[in-house]
Amino acid sequence: MPDTVQCVSPVDGGIYAERPLASERDLENACAAARRAQAEWRLVTLAERAKYCRRAVDAMLAMGDKIVPELAWQMGRPIKFGGGELKGLEERARYMIDIAKNALANIVPEAKPDFERFIIREPLGLVFTIAPWNYPYLTAVNSIIPALMAGNAVILKHARQTLLAGERFAQAFDQAGLPEGLFANLVLSHEQSARIIAGGLVDMVCFTGSVGGGASVEKSAAGRFMRLGLELGGKDPAYVRADADLGFAVENLVDGAFFNSGQSCCGIERIYVDHDLHDEFVDGFVNLTSQYVLGNPLEASTTLGPMVNAGAADFVRGQIASARDAGATAHVDEAAFPASKAGTPYLAPQVLTGVNHQMSVMREESFGPVIGIMAVSGDDEAVELMNDSRFGLTASVWTGDEAAARSIGDKVETGTFFMNRCDMLDPALAWTGVGDSGCGCTLSALGYEQLTRPKSFHLRTGTAS
């Protein structure tokens, strides 16, 4: 087994970063140090924990000028958009810090003579965060900051594609003066991660990644009865009703489909449009898509960067080719995007019509810059098609009728339902999914319930029978 991990940049195919794998002693020492630190940290007041976490957020933001180009080199996001991830990190972190006092407060039932009764929320102990490359700061912060605020220690294993993101978290906590051992960033192989879980060295795993990766985590955790939070895949649908603001829907759904080169678990991957709007919607969608600039993400003019690697791009190319062979129409001329070349991570965006649910592009997660659009007869058909998926992370409806949106939302099987927006996350709301999109939740007050265990106190204070 190789003793190093490499980040191969999608920009030029070169090795951008290389780090040695943690040794078994490193791993054991980190877990032992985390246990020692957590035993003291759990006794630290929430106000003090918040000071450390806020300083860490400030330190991360101060690194922005370095982080943005690092993101471009590591995973291909254009520098034009790199700062948005840090803004999102700040929003989520500060919100979770601010609500911790109420979210972690004791639960006290109605008074009962001669008894004092209450429920406290105890930290789980050691949280193992396994973070992905596509939003390396946003996804990791969802568990790291609330885990620490709840009194836990954290070990972070970041994706090989974004090795430097894990190091930036470690630097931020070092600069914040976080007690030694409480947070550790480890460079680990999949096999080492599996041994950590199977060996019961941690108390919770927060994993964001593929369905296959989530299944591997579950397999490793079998028999350990530990807490698991799994944010997995998506095939997120949008439904454009006949009463939608057409221009607004086009603008936002193009962005929802192609931002980050479509590499978002909650990105738009399939669209259903009322037949009365279908042709006009497609024309507007294709026109706006054609305005993207595909190229080197380090150039200010680039609005669509490369996919993470050539294999991922080739998978999407295969989906497009398969759909076209089955009768779908491709509306974007790839020749208009000269940077798009077979065998490279650079892939032109594509808009397909004439698609159906027998096609992979409408059923299997693409995680790339392709979208299938279908005409529907109305709400009932749209709901049926939106639910015809093994995934259920987010879904959206585009309409001027809030009552209709609520009715549709009640019927769609999804973790988050949007009206007139998509591909975003509100930290005040639980981030969760159904089906192959995973289990558990992060953020909101409910996110703290995942990171703690309830402990009941039943105290008899009187002598009455």
Image (spheres, helix red, strand yellow):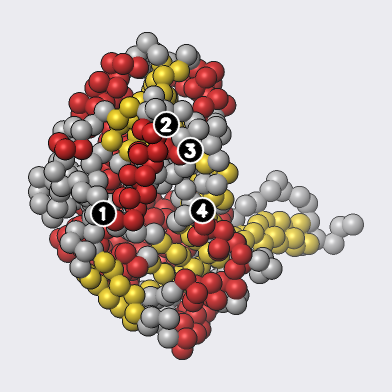
State the SS at label 3. loop
Residue at image mark 4? 211
Residue at image mark 2? 326
State the SS at label 2. loop
Residue at image mark 3? 363
Name the N-terminal-most of marks 4 and 1.
4
Which residue occupies the foreground of this view, 179 or 80?
80
Picture residue at 14% right of the left edge, 53% below the top: 296
Residues tagged 2 and 4 counted as in contact (Cβ below 8 A): no
Cα separation, mark 4 vs mark 1, equals 25 Å
Q: Is residue 57 visible?
A: yes
Q: Is residue 62 visible?
A: no
Picture residue at 31% right of the left edge, 50% below the top: 313
Residues tagged 1 and 3 counted as in contact (Cβ below 8 A): no
Residues tagged 3 and 4 counted as in contact (Cβ below 8 A): no
Residues tagged 3 and 2 counted as in contact (Cβ below 8 A): no
Image quadrant in which the C terminus is located: bottom right
In the rendered image, residue 322, in percent from the top left (x then y), is placed at 40, 38
Name the N-terminal-most of marks 3 and 2.
2
In the rendered image, residue 66, in percent from the top left (x then y), is placed at 17, 64
Q: Residue furthest top?
A: 276
Label 1 vs label 3, nearer the camera: 1
State the SS at label 1. loop
